[in-house]
Image (tube, rainbow, N blue to C red):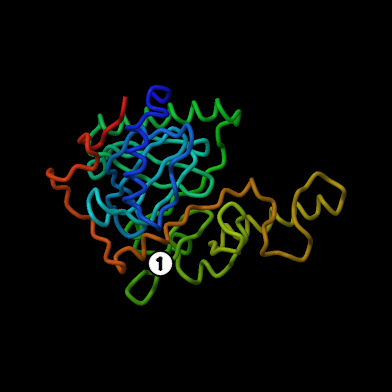
Amino acid sequence: MVDYLANTEINSQRIAAVESCFGASGQPLALPGRVLLGEGVLTKECRKKAKPRIFFLFNDILVYGSIVLSKRKYRGQHIIPLEEVTLEPLPETLQAKNRWMIKTAKKSFVVSAASTTERQEWISHIEECVRRQLLATGRPPSTEHAAPWIPDKATDICMRCTQTRFSALTRRHHCRKCGFVVCAECSRERFLLPRLSPKPLRVCSLCYRELAARKREEEEEEEGGGPGGGGAPGQPRAYLGGAECGASSGDDEDSDEDKEGGGDGDWPSRVEFYASGVSWSAFHG
């Protein structure tokens, strides 16, 4: 499928159409050998509530963004290299169906499709692209994944102290290491999570103790001539080891979406995204 579509005019037109919809805020997507394999709307579980997102599957990247004007304008473009992706199908419940998790070292989140068939199509196409990309790059499958953020509505009390009750005056916070919903008192510490940010980020008290203990062990090994890879002593809040700490995903952009007035929009049948009239979700073959 990739070889068939590569370097074709229809593929170039499709990619140009996606670039146009993201506008100047999006990154250029056209590269030699890059093929747009499919697109569609999936529901992404964000911090405050589940929201529809537009997804585009290329042979080497997964791109998604917020819907401003259906099939005309998108914003908040996110680009995920497929060699970093691992998928995890999630069990069905009465309230949540056709879900799976997209996991990377920097960000992990849950999406759902409109039907079981659609979910299976997305999973099978993504996994095949990941397999081909790993084969082409010679990289092993990713084993370090971020913890997804627990949605705000999942709990009314702090998941660490189990005492503080959230309200309009008592804010929820998220630990960037474990993704738990915690109160301010249980997330006073900051720690450097290199995979996610060059600056120290909020972590809960339990994760801080574990990370700080690991940092001390690395420093002691280094001072004793051992194989440790920690940073310099005297920096208890800076984790410099890197790969062992899977930094938690951040969905901070979702908390600002309502303020920006980005509506989900309708999907009128009279509007064609491509001149060829592609259905949604659609995979090109």
Give the position of the C terminus as an image quadrant.
Answer: top left
Q: Residue at x 37, y 48 (%)?
A: 19
Please name whichever residue, 63 or 108, is drawn nearer the observer in this view of the structure. 63
Q: State left or right for residue 107 relative to residue 67.
A: right
Q: State left or right for residue 83 relative to residue 15.
A: right
Against 187, residue 29 (above or below) is above
Residue 125 position, x and y percent, is 37, 29
Q: State left or right for residue 144 relative to residue 50.
A: right
- Report helix, strand or loop for mark 1: loop
Please name whichever residue, 2 or 82, is drawn nearer the observer in this view of the structure. 2
Q: Residue at x 54, y 29 (%)?
A: 134
Residue 197 position, x and y percent, is 57, 58
Please name whichever residue, 281 or 6, is drawn nearer the observer in this view of the structure. 6
Q: Quadrant of residue 216?
A: bottom right
Q: Residue at x 26, y 57 (%)?
A: 68
* Residue denoted by label 1: 172
Residue 168 position, x and y percent, is 32, 74
Give the position of the N terminus as an image quadrant.
Answer: top left
Q: State left or right for residue 16 relative to residue 275.
A: right
Against 184, residue 209 (above or below) is above
Against 259, residue 250 (above or below) is above
Q: How many marks?
A: 1
Give the crowd class for mark 1: few <14, some 14-19, many >=20 residues within 10 Å.
many
- Residue furthest to the front in view is 9
- Residue furthest to the bottom in view is 169
Please name whichever residue, 128 or 157, is drawn nearer the observer in this view of the structure. 128
Q: Which amino acid does the dot numbered 1 rest on?
A: Arg
Residue 76 position, x and y percent, is 38, 56
Q: Residue at x 52, y 49 (%)?
A: 106
